């Protein structure tokens, strides 16, 4: 393993901003992995740190197969994480919406450009991101449907679900999107948490990544062979949106099977506790996404049922 | 008449309300919508809304049609001094045309677009951010320039910047309306969290020019507001569009080139040049300094002779922070 500083930026007063890379193996650029790009992606950085730990052990035991190079970048934004901000603290811009970056542009465009220069050209790109709508997901692989995607390879992760999302215009500046445009097969792995560490779903994510490596002949690794993945279209899910503002009183959790008409949650009046509305499952299926905050506004996405 | 465009229940008691004032003239005619406050830290449009409503209310007999004023597309952001839509990750001007059954912010964007569609003209007023001061300008994407520039020239701005149509900008309010056939002009002026009265007065005059051209205003319109004196002194007449006293001679960006200057060092900016001034090649715009050691980290010099239309005023910079934009007229 070689630990390298991939990018450094001086700041007016605080410590220098550094992006570290952990490089394993030699030869072909096979996989690049990117963890926390936002300052609150604690779970995502934790997953990467565990991957680094596992890869150090695999390399020590000569289990990384020849002519495969793996680059892991656990954190692209230590500045924001250290001061509990989600985005770049100076101007609140999101590095993950600056790709492919511009090396003569604004600060976060330069960071994105420097990162992209390091991670482009790999055969596979794996990112551990968080979603712009906050809540809990069933762990899954998310692929932007750009026409360049390799859905079959995504099945090698052995996670139960692979979700295809049609990119909106605002998705065209994501790392995942630009990886694909530059001919890297890009996969985003969503685990259950963001700001907190959820050990079980974190382990699911790093083991799925090692499983992918093994099935692609990058490492020797014997673990559980995983699930047979179902490929789903994001637009095929049924959305449940709140009709009122108030306390969110959930009756089901992520991963639970529900039948059409089952009670999913109640919205309670925040002053007198009375029930303002009861939300029921629009279809029979699995709860794929759930809102996690204790309060909700009207028109908030509370559940997505698959 | 105040009307509510969007009303959404917040968790505890309040409603998020986006409202507009529909000022109906005494005669029938077209519909002009003036919107601002998408970014909660951009406040220059507040004076424009106030002054426009005040003048219209005094002359309803001259108004043909209706002017609809939306001072706050992001009322929670304005009232809490937050640029974005509080509690939502994406820039509000990157989620249009919205989603009918989408999340709160996306649904709000959808309802705003539905309300504005079919207006004869929409004017979307922005005011930079807290870091950069902008000269009064209209920004038009190259795909809409042919249609919009004739209207943009009426708005009394110093500059009309015709820019590339980047994919990510397809999610702006202006793009969403323009591609659906609702002509929308974007004005950018001043600086975040401040109001520049001169710009506001000039733009209001420009709106009356626009209304005259749309046959919406039959009253007087002779405030005789034109370009800044500095601009008139220093640029040639070849890019000017009019000799009318009430219409400023906007520079069209296609007659020259825009140069960007970004910081190469992180530190503190000490200003030298004045915003909205004409600078010559080699002239110092500002210095980036290190207050610990009293050292100059970077002298930022103008690469060309030109019009300094964007200038950083917030003193802390990182490498990459935008410092200035200069328009160089073609020789």
Image (cartoon, coloured by chain):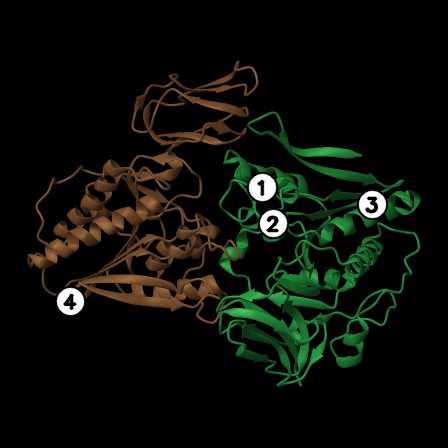
Chain colours: A brown, B green
Of badges 4 and 1, nearer the viewer stands: 4
Which of the two labelled residues, at mark 3 and mark 2, occupies the earlier sequence position? 3
Q: Is residue B330 left or right of residue A128?
A: right
Q: Which residue bears the numbered disc 1?
A: B109
- Asked if both marks, 3 and 4, belong to the same chain, the answer given is no
Q: Is residue B12 left or right of residue B22?
A: left
Q: Which residue bears the numbered disc 2?
A: B173
Calculate the distance from the C-alpha at mark 3 to the C-alpha at mark 2.
23 Å
Q: Are marks 1 and 2 in contact (CB under 8 Å)?
A: yes
Q: Secondary structure at mark 2?
A: helix
- Percent x, y for residue B99? 52, 39
Q: Secondary structure at mark 1?
A: helix
Q: Is residue B139 left or right of residue A130?
A: right
Q: Which residue bears the numbered disc 3?
A: B53
- Asked if both marks, 1 and 2, belong to the same chain, the answer given is yes
Residue A170 appearing in the image: yes
- Asked if both marks, 3 and 1, belong to the same chain, the answer given is yes
Residue B145 appearing in the image: no
**Front one among A302 and B27:** A302
Which of the two labelled residues, at mark 3 and mark 1, occupies the earlier sequence position? 3
Q: Chain of mark 1?
A: B
- Percent x, y for residue B205? 83, 58
- Percent x, y for residue B221? 90, 57
**Front one among A214 and B185:** A214
Q: Residue at x 66, y 76 (%)?
A: B272
Which of the two labelled residues, at mark 1 and mark 2, occupies the earlier sequence position? 1
Q: Secondary structure at mark 3?
A: helix
Q: Which residue bears the numbered disc 4?
A: A26
Q: Residue at x 62, y 39 (%)?
A: B76
Q: Is residue A217 left or right of residue B100?
A: left
């Amino acid at each position: 393993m070689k630990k390298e500083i991939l990018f450094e930026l001086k700041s007016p007063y605080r410590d220098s901003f550094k992006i570290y890379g952990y490089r394993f193996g030699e030869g072909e650029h096979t996989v690049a992995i990117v963890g926390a790009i936002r300052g609150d992606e604690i779970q995502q950085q934790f997953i990467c740190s565990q991957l680094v730990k596992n890869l150090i052990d695999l390399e020590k035991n000569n289990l990384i197969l020849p002519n495969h190079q793996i680059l892991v970048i656990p954190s692209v934004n230590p500045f924001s994480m250290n001061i509990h901000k989600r985005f770049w603290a100076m101007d609140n811009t999101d590095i993950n919406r600056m790709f492919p970056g511009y090396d003569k542009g604004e600060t976060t465009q330069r960071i994105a450009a420097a990162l992209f220069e390091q991670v482009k050209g790999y055969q596979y790109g794996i990112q551990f991101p968080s979603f712009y709508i906050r809540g809990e997901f069933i762990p899954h692989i998310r692929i932007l449907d750009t026409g360049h995607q390799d859905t079959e390879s995504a099945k090698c992760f052995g996670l139960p679900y692979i979700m295809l999302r049609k990119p909106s215009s605002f998705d065209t500046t994501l790392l995942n999107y630009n990886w694909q445009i530059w001919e890297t097969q890009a996969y985003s792995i969503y685990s259950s948490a963001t700001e907190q560490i959820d050990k079980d779903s974190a382990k699911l994510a790093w083991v799925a990544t090692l499983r992918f490596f093994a099935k692609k002949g990058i490492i020797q690794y014997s673990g559980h062979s995983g699930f047979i993945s179902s490929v789903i279209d994001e637009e095929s899910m049924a959305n449940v949106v709140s009709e009122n503002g108030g306390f969110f009183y959930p009756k089901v959790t992520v991963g639970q099977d529900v039948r059409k008409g089952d009670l999913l949650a109640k919205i309670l009046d925040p002053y007198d506790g009375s029930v303002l509305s009861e939300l029921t499952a629009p279809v029979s299926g699995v709860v794929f996404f759930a809102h996690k905050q204790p309060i909700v506004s009207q028109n908030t996405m509370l559940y997505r049922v698959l | 008449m105040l009307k509510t465009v969007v009303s959404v229940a917040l968790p505890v008691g309040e409603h998020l309300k986006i409202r507009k004032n529909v000022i109906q003239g005494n005669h029938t005619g077209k519909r002009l919508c003036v919107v601002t406050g998408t970014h909660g830290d951009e406040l220059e449009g507040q004076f424009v809304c106030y002054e426009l409503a005040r003048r219209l209310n005094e002359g309803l007999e001259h108004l043909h049609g209706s002017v609809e004023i939306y001072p706050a597309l992001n009322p929670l952001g304005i009232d809490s001094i937050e640029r974005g839509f509080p509690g939502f990750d994406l820039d509000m001007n990157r989620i249009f045309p919205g989603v009918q059954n989408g999340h709160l912010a996306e649904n709000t964007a959808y309802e705003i677009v539905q309300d504005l569609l079919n207006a004869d003209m929409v004017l979307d007023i922005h005011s930079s951010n807290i870091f950069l001061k902008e000269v009064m300008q209209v920004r038009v994407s190259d795909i809409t320039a042919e249609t919009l520039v004739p209207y943009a020239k009426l708005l009394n701005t110093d500059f009309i910047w015709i820019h590339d149509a980047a994919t990510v900008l397809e999610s702006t309010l202006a793009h969403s309306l323009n591609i659906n056939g609702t002509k929308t002009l974007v004005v950018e002026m001043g600086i975040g969290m401040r109001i520049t009265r001169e710009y506001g007065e000039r733009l209001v005059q420009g709106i009356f020019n626009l209304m005259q051209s749309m046959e919406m205003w039959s009253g007087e319109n002779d405030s005789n507001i034109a370009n800044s004196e500095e601009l008139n002194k220093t640029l040639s007449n070849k890019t000017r569009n009019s000799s009318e006293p009430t219409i400023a001679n906007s520079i069209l960006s296609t007659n020259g080139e825009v140069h960007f200057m970004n910081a190469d060092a992180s530190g503190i900016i000490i200003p030298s040049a004045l915003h909205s001034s004409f600078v010559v090649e080699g002239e110092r715009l500002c210095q980036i300094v290190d207050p610990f050691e009293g050292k100059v980290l970077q002298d930022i010099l103008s690469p060309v002779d030109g019009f300094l239309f964007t200038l950083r005023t917030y003193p802390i910079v990182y490498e990459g922070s935008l410092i200035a934009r200069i328009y160089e007229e073609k020789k």
